[in-house]
């Protein structure tokens, strides 16, 4: 079954009943919102995504030729993981890890196919859902950290770091970056009332990221915000719009510094901030520290065509890899080790090629691409290979790129027919 298109907003879409379109868009919103609640297994995100996948396949979902390389790389990546895990299948946690990896691949294809049609509308619903979910997670994290909810401190924090509705403070911080970028876009571009609302949303998410005490998330928010704003300036259509982006970005930076100053007035927060901001962490240093393990693991991977299997790295070293690219080699051998970076950096290269393409969804594209680039960089120091939002962004990138190809062809055809 095909989809309806609204002139100037939907790319290469075909007709569908209004009720079907409304249901599909509502499910995209629900998937985005549920992505913030992952502290239980199976999480609401898994359940909602599965429901949305079944519904979309029942009501119409199109696989485009441009997505075939994506499918091939995802399949080869997980074949490598599965083959390397065969001797370890008696370990239930390994079986669960393999199943999760295949499921993540399915979600990538789901997001790619979903965002390749009715693109502008579905991206808007995904954005709205992510912001709602992020606000829930952020408010939970803040309430837990400041002990505003009876009994909530133990549930919503870990090691005196805010984690909200996530199991890990690092993942909370990483998840919040994309919704925070969406809110920041509204602050610098939208009319006063909407921009004012998003000032509070961006502030709350930024506070939650700060209280997660994740150095990667701190740096990720600053760098991805700066990168996205730079792209927005470069792609703006008018000088007035460029000026507003620059002025509002400066105002946001000043307010952010003021927020940090207020937080540092609390002794406990200042001490934790000082501890986490230090680059002199014991688990980073030494022969078997984070970066030492990267070198030793890389040397080890060269001699192991089939790797050592998923979740086995800690049997050889004090901790896990904390490097997704190395983990691909160790968990799935040379096949996965080559496919994972090929998948990630092919997406990055294609993403850069579409930055300046004028599209109805360019604004959302710049936010997703910026957050994706941040996670790609973060993957060098953290295991991101089972982060739900990372695979969601990867799928959305491919879907938007596929939609852009169709949009450009359609625009050329319309121009030539005039």
Image: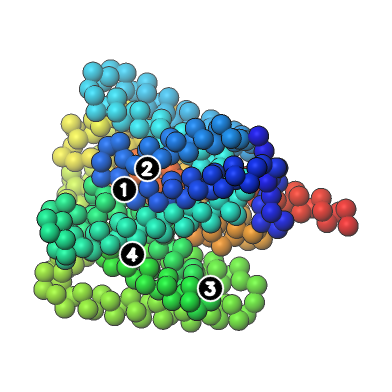
Q: Which residue is mark 1?
A: 37
Q: Where is residue 389 drawn, in percent x and y?
A: 40, 47
Image: 207 above or below 283: below
Viewer-nearest of discs 3 and 2:
2
Q: Where is residue 56 drawn, in percent x and y?
A: 54, 36
Number of numbered callouts drawn: 4
- Residue name at image x 58 percent, y 54 percent: 121
Q: Which residue is mark 2?
A: 45
**Marks 3 and 2, Cα distance to the nearest angstrom?**
30 Å
SS of the residue under disc 1? loop
Q: Is residue 357 visible?
A: no
Quarter holding the N terminus is top right
- Residue name at image x 28 percent, y 68 percent: 207
Q: Is residue 75 visible?
A: yes
Considering every residue shown, the one lying at the far front of the view is 19
Image: 250 above or below 388: below
Tags 2 and 4 touching, CB below 8 Å: no
Image: 392 above or below 367: above
Q: Which residue is mark 3?
A: 189
- For label 4, count other residues whose C-alpha is less than 10 Å away and answer few (under 14), some (14-19) or many (20+): many
Q: Where is residue 129 drawn, in percent x and y?
A: 44, 54
């Amino acid at each position: 079954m095909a989809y309806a298109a609204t002139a100037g907003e939907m790319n290469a879409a075909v007709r569908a009943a209004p009720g079907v379109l409304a249901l599909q868009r509502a499910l995209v919103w629900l998937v985005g919102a549920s992505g913030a609640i992952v502290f239980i297994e199976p999480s609401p995100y898994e359940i909602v995504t599965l429901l949305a996948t079944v519904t979309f396949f029942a009501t119409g979902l199109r696989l485009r030729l441009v997505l075939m390389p994506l499918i091939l790389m995802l399949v080869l990546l997980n074949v490598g993981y599965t083959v390397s895990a065969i001797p370890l299948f008696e370990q239930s946690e390994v079986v669960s890890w393999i199943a999760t990896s295949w499921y993540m691949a399915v979600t990538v294809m789901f997001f790619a196919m979903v965002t390749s049609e009715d693109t502008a509308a579905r991206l808007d619903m995904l954005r709205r859902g992510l912001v709602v979910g992020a606000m829930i997670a952020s408010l939970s994290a803040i309430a837990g950290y400041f002990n505003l909810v009876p009994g909530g401190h133990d549930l919503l924090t870990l090691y005196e770091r805010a984690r909200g509705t996530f199991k890990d403070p690092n993942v909370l911080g990483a998840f919040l970056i994309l919704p925070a970028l969406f809110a920041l876009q509204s602050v610098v571009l939208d009319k006063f009332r909407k921009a004012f609302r998003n000032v509070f949303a961006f502030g709350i998410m930024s506070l939650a990221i700060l209280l997660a005490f994740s150095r990667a998330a701190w740096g990720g928010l600053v760098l991805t915000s700066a990168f996205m704003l730079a792209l927005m300036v470069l792609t703006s259509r008018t000088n007035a719009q460029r000026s507003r982006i620059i002025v509002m970005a400066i105002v946001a930076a000043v307010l952010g510094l003021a927020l940090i100053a207020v937080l540092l007035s609390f002794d406990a927060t200042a001490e934790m901030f000082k501890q986490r901001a230090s680059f002199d962490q014991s688990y980073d240093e030494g022969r078997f520290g984070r970066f030492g393990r990267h070198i030793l693991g890389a040397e080890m991977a060269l001699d192991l065509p089939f790797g050592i299997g998923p979740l086995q790295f800690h049997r050889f070293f004090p901790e896990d890899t904390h490097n997704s690219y190395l983990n691909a080699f160790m968990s799935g051998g040379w096949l996965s080790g080559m496919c994972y970076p090929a998948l990630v950096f092919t997406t990055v290269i294609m993403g850069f090629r579409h930055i300046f393409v004028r599209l109805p969804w360019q604004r959302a594209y710049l936010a997703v691409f910026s957050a994706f680039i941040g996670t790609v960089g973060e993957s060098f120091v953290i295991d991101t290979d089972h982060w739900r939002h990372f695979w969601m962004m990867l799928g959305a990138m491919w879907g938007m790129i596929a939609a852009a190809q169709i949009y450009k062809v359609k625009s050329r055809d319309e121009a030539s027919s005039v």
